[in-house]
Each structure stands twice: as C-alpha cells, then as structure tokens.
Image: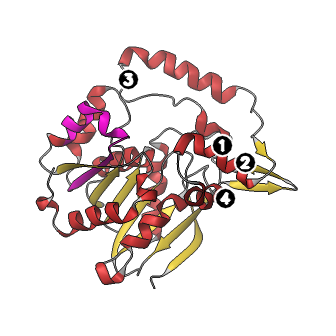
Amino acid sequence: MHKHTDTSLSVNGMRYSLQSWGDDTALPMLAIHGWLDNSESFAPLAEKLADEQLAGVHLVAPDLAGHGRSDHRPASGSYNIWDDLRDLVLIADALGWQQFSVVGHSRGAMIAMLLAAAMPDRVSHAIFLDGFWPFPEPAEKAPEQLRRHIVEFNRSRNPVPSYASLEDAIVARQSYTRLPAEILRPMVLRNMIQHGARWAWSTDARLRYASAFKLTEAHSHAFAEAIRCPGLALLASKGMAKYREMIEVIGSRPNLHVQVQPGDHHWHMETPAAVAGAIRAFLANPSAVAD
C-alpha cells in the first residue's frame, strides 16, 4: 500500500494544505488542480501513479490559494492565473525539489504551461490534462478587461451560497462537472464548511471575478515556444479536444505531444487507470509517445 499524507506548509505568508501520495524517494511530481476544484481531484489518479510496483511517482497536490483547505489571498490579493506561480515554486523549494515534473488539469494545465515556460531549469516533464494555454484575447480588449477586474474586486462581496445538506452541494457542483456523486463527494467535501445545519463553500468568491489581463495570441505562442522539457497534452474527447488551433500549436513543437482519450472534462477522475497509463508511458520514454 502506498503512502498518503494530508498536511500543510506556509509560504509567502499563507498556509497551504497539500496531499501527497507515494514514496518521497520516487520521481517528484507537482499536481495543479483546476478552477474551483482542489487536491482531492487528483486522488483517483494519484492512487494509480503512486503504485510502487509500476515505477510509482511521489505526487504532491496542493489546494491552490482560495481553494479547499488553503488560505484565501489577503484583501489586497487577486487570483490572476500567474499569481499561483511564485507560491508553487516556493512549495517545491520547501519540499526540497530542485527539479520536478508537473501535471495540471484545466486551469491547472494552463498554470503548468506557464510554469514550464518560465522555469525551464526546474520543470523536467509537463503533463497537461484537458487544457494547455489560457485562451488568448485580442490586445484591444485589454482596457475593458482591466475595467471589469477593478469593478468586480471593489464591489461588495456577495454572500457565499449555502445548502441544507452536503448532497445538495454535490448536486450543485454536478451541474459543472457531470461527475457521478460518489466520485465527486470527496472533492466537494474538501471545499465545504459546515455552519450548524448548513453547508457553505470554503472557496474564495473572488476566484469568480475577472482577471486583470488576458494573454494575447502572441503571448500564448511565446510561452508555448519557451517550453524546453518534454510535454504531453492528454485531452478529453468531449472536452478540450475540440480546440483544433490549440492542438496544432502543441503538435508543432517537437518536444510536445498530444493524445486524445475518450471522456469528459474530468475524465481523469472517472477513468484514472487510462490516464495514469499514458502518463507512465510518457515518463518512461517521452520520445516514443504517439500523437
């Protein structure tokens, strides 16, 4: 049976909750979850990847700022996609990882892409699960984007929705993920706080507010071209596989590969063995991956 821990550490003045699976002498892998998810979204996949009989990895998945059991950013803070990068590097430092692989899902895949591009000396392999780059916006939309960011972050906070039961919260989250309740339950529970008889999200409401800026197409291409490590984009057939331009950009890079697997956006939670198998094959021989 592989080792699992649920602990926390402090970086940048914030407490981060994180889960880890596997032997800490195995290949280090930093797992970056998606928007409004948390580290529990990697539990099914981690169970497969940490299998010591199959050359397991040491997978560490933080709850990102404002998610799960981690701290919210301070009142002056924001949740632009690049705001997570500094903290993730500090988490790797605290773990004693000079080099590590990254696996990210959805928004986490976008963060992984930026991290691999900006820190090529730290990231040895990059796996992108149903995501790759922040969807580009034309530069002329930047003033309106910044206006939305200022207005939304300065307005009065809306009350966090609450529910009469955990089951009601699971049903609400199912409208976004379409996952079966039994698979979704642990992830929802990690994002909830119980107040008496009511259940409320622990997630920071500011995560739903507009970013200050969006990357342009030129920015996105520059980041893709800056990735030096081997990379694998595993896309869901009913998810991001429909974005042909993104697939063409990934496929144009000699060190990046694309594979499409059957499933929806959170398929790594429903069929983790297939995803783990593809990741394990990629780690063993990145150049042998078939697009």
Asked if the residue at tag 1 contacts the one at tag 2, i.e. Cβ–Cβ closer than 8 Å, the answer is: yes
Q: Which residue position holds label 4?
A: 189
User: How many numbered marks appear?
Assistant: 4
The mark found on residue 281 in the picture is none
Q: Name the residue under label 1.
A: 172
**Left or right of residue 82: residue 155:** right
Q: Which label sits in the foreground, 2 or 4?
A: 2
Residue 168 is labelled as: 2
Q: Is residue 174 magenta?
A: no
Could you tell me if residue 175 is visible in this image? yes
Q: How far apart are marks 1 and 4 (CA)?
A: 13 Å
User: Can residue 201 be seen at all in this image of the molecule?
Assistant: no
Q: Which amino acid does label 3 sit on?
A: Glu
User: For this rendering, which residue is in front, 245 or 203?
Assistant: 245
For the residues labelled 2 and 1, the Cα–Cα distance comes to: 6 Å
> Which circle, 3 or 1, is nearer the viewer?
1
